[in-house]
Image (cartoon, coloured by chain):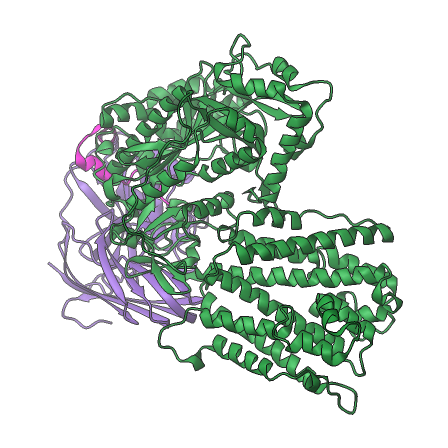
Amino acid sequence: MPVYTITHATTYRYAHPVLLSHQAVHLEPLATAAQECLDFSLEAKPGPLETSVRTDYFGNRVHYLTITEPHQQLDITTRSQVAVTPPKPLPADATCGETRAWLEKSLEPAAHQVRQFLFDSPNVRRVPWARELAAQLFADERPVLEAARELNTLIHREFAFDTAATHPATPLEEFIQIKRGVCQDFAHLAVAVLRAAGLPGRYVSGYLLTNPPPGQPRQVGADASHAWFSAYAPGSGWADYDPTNDTLCNENHITTAHGRDYSDVSPVRGTVVGGGSQALFLGVTVVPAGKPGV
Amino acid sequence: MSNAATMPATAATSPADWLKKYLPAAGRHDELKDARGAIRPVWRKLAETLAAASAEELAQDSEQVHRLIQENGITYNVYGEAGNTTRPWGMDVVPMLLEHAEWEKIETALSQRARLFNLILRDLYGAQTLLEQRIIPPALVLGNPAFLRPCHGYTPPNGMFVPIYGADLGRAPTGQWWVLAERLDAPSGTGYSLENRALTARVLPNWLRDNLVARLAPFIQTLRDCLAGLAPQRPDPPRMALLTPGPANETYFEHSYLARNLGFPLVEGGDLLVRGQRVCLKTLMGLRPVDLILRRVDSDYCDSLELRRDSLLGVPGLLQAVRAGNLAMANALGAGLLEAPGISPFLPALCRHLLGEELKMPSVATWWCGQPRELDYVLEHLESLILLPALSTSTREAVVGPRLDQAQREQWRDRLRAEPEAWCAREWVALATTPVYEHGKLTPRIFQLRTLVAARGEDYHALPGGLTRIPAEDDDLTVSMQRGGRSKDTWVLLPPGRPPVAEVAAPAPAVVKLRRPAPDLPSRVADNLYWMGRYVERTDGQTRVLRLLAGALAGEGAAADPELLRPFFETLLLQDASYLLAPGQQPALDLAAAERSLRAMLWDTAQPNSLANNIARIEHMAYRVKEYLPADMWSLLGRLGRKRRTPAETAAFLRVAFAELRDAIVQLAAINGFMTENMIHGYGWRFLDLGRRLERGLNMADMLGRVLSRPGTPSPALLNELLVSSECLPMYRRRYLANLNLVAVLDMLACDDSNPRGLAYQLQCVRQHVEEFPREPGSDPASRPVERLAHALTAQAELLDAHHLAQTNEAGARPALREFLHTVIRDLSALSDALGQAYFAHSQPEAKS
């Protein structure tokens, strides 16, 4: 069972002093069936006057910081140790038709939890493009997870990774048009297609191992926060796909948060009084435990 | 709207005829007449009164209502109307009447709905069994943008999500009341209802007296008790505030009206901040915790950290204070979820499930297209239905089936099939009508009734009557004050023998903690009061100079030498002198040029420092601190700011200008009187008066400098004009008779600290105010520039000697005077800036990361 050490450094620099800063941080790795968070620490400079933590609607840990010391630079650094279980092969899964019927009728608590991910959310609307693709890929007789795998590949093939093309507020329609973007855009699009098919689509934020094991290529998105999506089939549960790298998620993927889309789980979200214009600097390293960071 | 009120009544017809000629349309319920044309019993008394009135009386009453509305500044702001965003409130002179027995049924039904909504919200923001068991379709909640996930897991004390609930009712042709729309997030209407009643009481006291009308005022006490009961228990009394989006909001008038009546500070997001999981108000005394917020900001705008991140209206971190149990919100954040029209078809089943009761008042028939059978029905009956977005509370996007052509209907059918969950359809409702006085007669017009209830213990009490709204056009679909509708005072008539005052006995606390001075003046309010004081004084000084100039043009005083007027024009124009009189522009100031200047300085809004613009500045500031000012001041401000005329012909112009300036001077004196006599002389008043004193000091120093800084001995004529413009001539004459002497004039205007118009007096007042201001404990006086400057100024003034000031040098100039005036102007300006730094520094712009 691989154990990783993750360091995530966020730095904001401001043109003018910030007098009061509130931050909400979604960076503590999630405890799931496939991973265990062994250790987590959060450090801020200047030191926060107060911090609190709670579990949000989707089961993620959110850390709140309030900084009252005037500052022109804010550093937030988190360090985590996570043990990841390699995924087991998925059992034979339900068809799209069966899944839709189950979602429509079931009174099980599991169905209720899954239905949380069926509807439009701030960054993901079931746009016409998604509806058309959904009709092609998710026919009634098709197994859900097989179709999701195809969706994963299709998005990877049709869209190019380009960090300069989009920003967090770029609408999905625009990404579809320019066909370039980052992992959040890839994940959002997949989620939109699943939901347009009447199936649940979940957004996942997390990390990728910075330097892969020998013999494997270095993956896109390994030096920053990463994002991917999950599809659901009754009997199988949630399965994770990484459309940026056209792969099923494996023991190189570490999950920090689940949500409907990026807006539910943005890693560091803040509001400051003062400050003027600002610049953001990010640094992420994920290394096997015991090895020095990059 | 105003045309209807001012149109002369047709002389031939009388109100008795109007009642006969009042013919409601068939197929609708009418409030005044039943289907056979007989006056309904509830109207009998008022119908008699109406019939006995003359057409002129009613026209006058209607006009009077309109005038009071304008004078009291009752407005409903309209977004997106460039330039003029406030619109006078419209109230029809004829009230809406409701029988007591009928009203009690309405109140019971509303109370039941409010209790039901609390239970639904408690489940949806908690265990969600209603979703799990599919009693509410998940799409209507989980796909609803008004479902605020960061608020999930929090239950307000006693499960009170909607302490205040509003519903828009309409009456069916059968007489049955329907709920047309729910108002759960931040219901409005209480303040306008109270204001409507106050208008009726002033214009038609006899109508109110002759009928036993349930009073509205006790509802304010109900509301206050209800809110105090929600606040976390620690402090007594709890510290409560009304959160408004600000003066641009459509119902800002009501926010300030309610805040004043409830005795709450009216605050904007920028007045609050979160520290230690508490929301605090920035006051002159420092940060003061707030326990309860009555909010008129929509839920999703309340906390940019966890809700809408582009919001500038809320308080970042507010949700943390709510979760920590340190702050109660009325209504709870996220309560607006159930306003979605798609929810209403599920209310009868929810009511049976949660309350074990039948729903007492139906919603207007609605079909949510997310269900297959309902969708089929809607597809089939589209031509008679209204389509609404299932999750939006706005009726703007409504699609009226009967108005679609065949092709459009087909397109809509396709769209409904593609996104059925997003739409619901509503029955076309033939709303009831009520008599409205317009164009000099009574006309049946459709209406909606905004009702409001507030929690009282386990149950709810209603504002008896509520707000009747008449749409601008007879449209069954939308009644929006934004689109220029009118309203009606709404009477619940009590049965004979019943006291009209529903007794609301608030349990009197045994000991009242005395509070002097009133605590917690928000910094923003102090800022606005200070500037209001400055603008009032600026305008006051200006009217006097303008009167002097008008007099000169009319042949009084300085008319023989228009050049004498130049320094006075300059004082009026301040830095903007170039607009009319470029510095160094030497051609003699002839009478024609003087008249042009005077016209511009009066009512020309293109001239930045015109009287019209200064009056507008007073109004703007006053509007922002409305709840701190005496209520009667509004009629004065209303009169001061009314539209003026400027005849083209010189003599007529001067006559009108004189009369209007006299009016303005009297109104400004009355405004000053109100401020001195009707405001507690606490911090708020001190900032207001400081503004006046500082401005008067600046103006006096400026005027003395301009008039007396020229070399040579000033002529008696010039000294005379100086005394006139500063309102000191009568005082001077009592002391010195007609002997106009420079030293004596300087003594009176600059040195004498017993002259309330003189410079020394202003400086004394400034210092007194500053010494009373709150200060950080233990801080060093040297680091308090406001105090330091105030002390330096009075120290200077105490040493003043008029003989010294009047001394000339070889060139005939007066260096001592110039030096002194220069210091005064510099230090007063610096004091004003320092004041801003020390007390008002509260509204830095926010940036988001």
Pick whichever, B196 or A240, lies toward us.
B196
Residue B137 lies, in percent from the top left, at 29, 30
Image height check: is B40 above or below B752? above
Is B268 situated left or right of B55 in this image? left
What color is chain A drawn in? Answer: purple
Residue segment shown in magenta? A101-122
Quadrant (top left/top right/bottom left/bottom right) for the N terminus of chain B: top right
Residue B824 lies, in percent from the top left, at 61, 78
Residue B371 lies, in percent from the top left, at 33, 24
Question: Which quadrant of the structure image shows residue B665?
Answer: bottom right
Quadrant (top left/top right/bottom left/bottom right) for the C terminus of chain B: bottom left
Is B369 situated left or right of B814 in this image? left
What color is chain B drawn in? Answer: green
Residue located 30% across and 44% down the image: B508
Residue A8 lies, in percent from the top left, at 26, 65
Res. B775 in view: yes
Residue located 70% across and 62% down the image: B542
Pick whichever, A180 or B809, lies toward us.
B809
